[in-house]
Image (tube, helix red, strand yellow):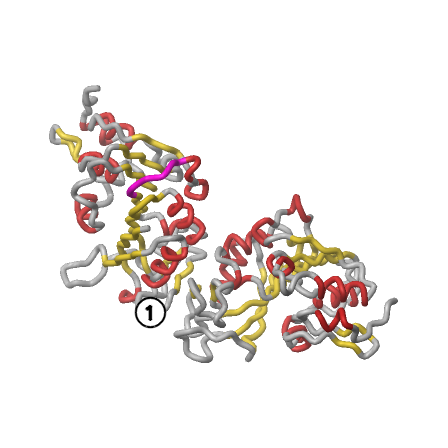
Amino acid sequence: MAAALVTKEQVNEIFWWHTIDLGNGIRTPGGTDTYRKVKEIGLPRDLHGKSVLDIGAWDGFFSFECEKRGATRVVALDHVVWNDPTVGRRGFDLARGALDSKVEDFDCDVYDIHPDRVGVFDLVLFLGVLYHVQDPLLVLGNVASVTRDHLILETHVDFCELDRPVMAFYPELECAGDLSNWFGPNAAAIEGMLKTVGFTKVKAFWSHIDSRWKPVGYKVAGGERSQFGRMVFHAWK
Amino acid sequence: MATAVMDDELRSINWFHQIDLGGGVTTPGIDDTATKLAQVHLPADLTGQSVLDIGAWDGFFSFECEKRGASRIVALDGGVWKVGHIGKKGFEYARRSLASSVEDVEMEVMDITPERLGVFDLVLFLGVLYHLPHPVLGIKRVAAVTGKQMILETHVDLLDHDRPAVAYYPWDQCANDPSNWCGPNPAAVKGMLRLAGFRRIETFGPTPVAYDVVGARRGTFGRMVFHAWK
């Protein structure tokens, strides 16, 4: 199949989250700098022979990136965003056509992820989703059940000054003024949860660091800037 | 009404609650149940009320609600009644001795639904929350079978933090017991109760009785009681 021809007008009609280079000088005007993020998360350069599941795919940038890096099968999974009437799946569909991509799409809520439904994948991306769920350990258990080998988890973190496992809870608008943000776990809590759900090795690092080496992230009402930020976790079974 | 004596059967049971069975016999439980009863602030008069007691164990609080006039009481337990060396023997012995009409249901908190259980005026949820790996989901399940009021008693942690926070115990950080999963602070418990549909909340405590937490300063953890109304 040949790549679909896409015009700037078509691109501009869509609310984009991901910045995606579609070729022919067209780059989607996304709200997030995906080319910076893909470096921060430490996505393996070579994914030849791997199957990849991208949970919370949105416009699909990371799925398309895995395909470029040689993954044999890539499934983009989303539910909340793709079913949001103001956002939807138009961005993903347009980009997939423009890139002539074979990435598969699967509409599934994270609470319904199960190997019988979704399958099992060598690499699972779980980027920017964990803090949007009310039951993080339950959902991480679902994610682990479809991970054969390697998970890359990127998330908002809070209470970073504490060594023992703690999660901030945001029952209202405490985190970034966004009602869909529920939890801000610290690194020890995430590592503990990952081990609880069956991963044996965990590596953690800060993702977004500013020019003065300070973590950047969602603001938390009542929290000090040194307490919160964004982190990346690589975990292996 | 049956009269209890300290017989061999009673002695063979691993009691948790201290229950006055009459005739001068109190079950030799390891729990200071009288102190807990005072801390829970159970209403003195429960005439005409239906009550669900989640995590009933030997049933002390169920029997106490019956004494206070509740019209229907269901004692519910899951884990404890299935543990080989504890089981349901204490509950059944006490119910027989007290000639009580308390009903029993074996069910896990995560399986609670109004279709399966019905809805109760008062729900007791004592000493269970911190055993749940998914506390938000657990409170929502319990809220779904609560008609008016919930009395929640729990281990609390992070008392030195004002904003809602939950300590997580992946291993045996809390009381050296791997079945303890989380220690919410009071703001987090209130936030979860509101999220589950409760509008008015009163708190009691923290009480001096406490589970130790590895890595936490003394005085920053304890036990608290929350009364919540829909």
Q: Which range of residues does the magenta coloring cover? A: A118-123
Crowding at dot 1, Cα within 10 Å, few <14 / some 14-19 / many 20+, comes out as few
Closest to the observer: B105 or A24?
B105
Above or below, comparing residue B59 to residue B139 in the picture: below
Name the chain letter of the residue that bears numbered label 1: A
Residue B182, percent from left and from top: 47, 63
Q: Residue at x 19, y 35 (%)?
A: A70
Above or below, comparing residue B44 to residue B124 in the picture: below
Above or below, comparing residue B53 to residue A150 in the picture: below
- Count of numbered circles on the image: 1
Residue A203 visible somewhere in the drawing: yes
Residue occupied by mark 1:
A163
In reply to whether residue B122 is colored magenta, the answer given is no
Q: Is residue B74 left or right of residue B195?
A: right
Residue A41, percent from left and from top: 22, 50
Q: Residue at x 31, y 65 (%)?
A: A160
Residue A29 visible somewhere in the drawing: no
For the residue labelled by badge 1, is the local secondary structure a helix, a strand or a loop? loop
Q: Of the residues shown, which amino acid type is indicated by label 1?
A: Asp
Q: Residue at x 31, y 59 (%)?
A: A219
Closest to the observer: B205 or A145?
A145
Q: Is residue B32 left or right of residue A187?
A: right
Residue at the far top in the pictured view = A1
Q: Residue at x 70, y 66 (%)?
A: B61
Residue A94, percent from left and from top: 26, 28
Closest to the observer: A222 or B122?
B122
Closest to the observer: B188 or A123?
A123
In reply to whether residue A119 is colored magenta, the answer given is yes
